[in-house]
Image: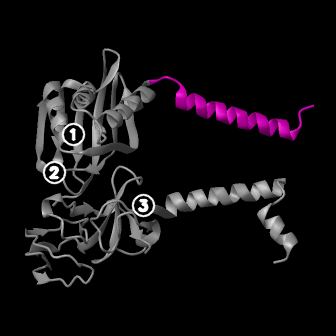
Amino acid sequence: MVNGRTIVVAVVVAFVAAVAAYRFWPGDERAIRGQLALVEEMGSKDEAEQPMDGLVRAAQLAALFDDPCQLTVESTRHAGSFSRKQIQDRIVLVRTSFARVRVSLHDIVIDRIDNGTAALHGTLRLSGQGTGDPVADVQEVRVEMARIDGQWLFTAVTLVEVLER
Amino acid sequence: MTVAPLRRFLFPELNRRFLLRLLLVALAATAVFTQVLIPLRIEGKSMEPTYRDGGFAFCWRGRYLFAEPGRGDVVAIRFAGQRVMLLKRIVGLAGDTVEFRNGALFVNNAMVREPYIRSPSDWNLAPRRVEPGKVYVVGDNRAVPLERHQMGQVERARIAGGVLW
């Protein structure tokens, strides 16, 4: 005879299994979020980082971008297509300007995934120490990605202008 | 409080009634602190001295349900979501003209007294009109260079709420 407690336990187990399956089942969303986690990891820098490690991390970060990739900065009305090498050089330049920096992505929303392309938006946060005072910057980003050779790459990145001077 | 009730309060019996109460309290706390009163850990110095780096506040979501934002209000500006927000002070409303002359704020060509500003400022910003549906926000810390300060006009819809204290 099945009693009430058994039913409650079965419902809880089913719920936990469903949540675990949703979170850990391999799929496009999981792969995309994995690439975003790499952005956080490779973009961040601690004070003890050696220059060669910095170059390797910049190369790994640049490898997440399609070649070329469309970059747009709404606040400066700047838009252009940049090669992976140009992006890597820019990453090296920006990371060098920090003694330490933490890159984090928040509130990531995947707007659509279909036919090997995806669109998402979120909040990019940089916090760290420059040459003098602490540096903190927050930007809203819109990103387009495509699955190229089995890997999700950034094909377009836009820094959204939230505050317009 | 005598010893027995105190003991019951501190070490409650784990019965069905207690677990139900615990569940309701957890649900209510989750609803309140994610939708109504969002806890804010303040990072950065852009609102000093009003809000200190490392301080704590709440974003009160109901602040503008039945009232419009006004000049002088401190508001939380959301980006892609509510995990990362900017605290800023509204200095201009839609239709206003905002400018800075040698650190002094002018709205509609009249100088504004700002008792909350403690630091000297040399900001100069040409007049600009706030577009319909937007407000102009600035931080209280005017000692930082103008070009490094996140400020400007922002859509009214991006105001997540006021700051509780």
Name which of mark 2 and mark 1 comes first in the sequence: 2
Image coordinates of residue B153 in percent, x first then y, are 21, 63
Circles 3 and 2 on the same subunit: no
Please report, as a chain letter, where disc 2 is located.
Answer: A
Q: Secondary structure at mark 3?
A: strand
Look at label 3 and name its amino acid: Arg
Label 3, label 2: how far apart the Cα atoms are: 27 Å
| Left or right position of B139 against B20 | left
Image coordinates of residue B52 in percent, x first then y, are 35, 69
Q: Which residue has dot 2 on it? A: A75
Residue beneath the point at 28% across and 33% down: A144
Q: Which residues are magenta?
A: A1-27
Look at label 1 and name its amino acid: Arg
Please report, as a chain letter, where disc 3 is located.
Answer: B
- Number of residues whose C-alpha sits closer than 10 Å to that of mark 3, classed few (under 14), some (14–19) or many (20 or more): some
- Residue A6 lies within the magenta run: yes
Residue B115 in view of the camera: yes
Q: Which residue has dot 1 on it? A: A95
- Number of residues whose C-alpha sits closer than 10 Å to that of mark 1, classed few (under 14), some (14–19) or many (20 or more): many
Label 2, label 1: how far apart the Cα atoms are: 21 Å
Disc number lying in front (3 or 1): 1
Q: Which residue has dot 3 on it? A: B41
Q: Quadrant of residue A43?
A: top left
Residue beneath the point at 25% across and 68% down: B139
Please report, as a chain letter, where disc 1 is located.
Answer: A
Decide: is A110 above or below A55.
below
Q: Assess whether mark 2 and mark 3 are in contact (beta carbons under 8 angstroms).
A: no
